[in-house]
Amino acid sequence: SQTIHQWPATLVQPVGSPLSLECTVEGTSNPNLYWYRQAAGRGLQLLFYSVGIGQISSEVPQNLSASRPQDRQFILSSKKLLLSDSGFYLCAWSVRKTEAFFGQGTRLTVV
Amino acid sequence: AQSVTQPDIHITVSEGASLELRCNYSYGATPYLFWYVQSPGQGLQLLLKYFSGDTLVQGIKGFEAEFKRSQSSFNLRKPSVHWSDAAEYFCAVGAASSASKIIFGSGTRLSIRP
């Protein structure tokens, strides 16, 4: 069966520090991969999605970037965090004719 | 471009009353439509989905949704809500293309009045 792993669960980082959040999927091949951010009152905002290795679409101009070095690995990064980067980050995957399946999320607090 | 609108930010209904949460979408092709629920401190759980066929879709926990192409809507309904239904509800739209992304609405927070 398919599973998705996202870590860490919580993270507290100082302003200006780098960020790396990792997500891996097991049990499926060539999934679409997503990074969403959930902020209070703003729902689930799609940040990046990828349909294949090295193929990244950015949905929102921001301080973040994403990479997909392997088929089932998706990484969210920042060189210098801002206070406004705080939020709940969710990784998800889907394949054709399925819904999005979510990881447990990372609560990021930038201080 | 794909978009999803959930016009109600917060709804309060009495326990035992009926519920309808609104969702309108914008998409050029035939959409795939989803409703998710997120309880406080929990992850996202799929309630139901529409891909094709019967426009009235049954989901878990007694929820149903109706796809109305002419109105670009996919409203979620429940005939009688329970206190445990208090949560945040998200509508989402995707498509048949393997390259399609899934876009979520801003969510509707449901409170239940005892």
Image: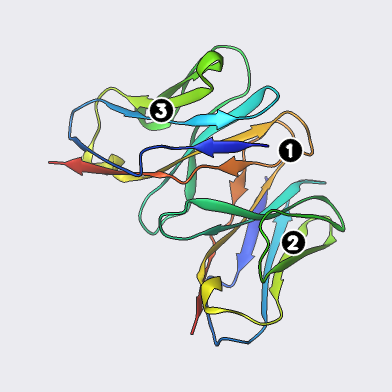
Q: Quadrant of residue B63?
A: top left
Q: Identify the image quadrant of the N terminus of chain B.
A: top right
Task: Say which residue label 3 marks.
Answer: B76
- Asked if residue B112 shows in the view, the reply is yes
The kind of secondary structure element at disc 3 is strand
Of residue A11 and residue A48, the one placed in the foreground of this image is A48
Check disc 3: other Cα within 10 Å, few if <14, some if 14-19, many if 20+.
many
The span from disc 1 to disc 2 (Cα, nearest Å) is 17 Å
- Residue B13 versus residue B40 in the image, above or below: above
Contact flag, marks 3 and 2 (Cβ < 8 Å): no
Tell me residue A5's x, y (percent).
64, 61
Task: Relative to B8, say whether B38 is above or below.
Answer: below
Q: Which quadrant holds the C terminus of chain B?
A: top left
Dot 2 lies on which element? strand
* Figure quadrant of residue B21: top left
Residue A103 picture location, percent across and down = 58, 56
Residue identifier under label 2: A74
Query: Where on the picture, by quarter, is residue B8?
Result: top left
Same-subunit check for callouts 3 and 2: no
Chain label for disc 2: A
* Above or below B26: residue A56: below
- The answer to whether one can see residue A10 in this image is no
Query: For mark 1, what is the residue?
Result: B100
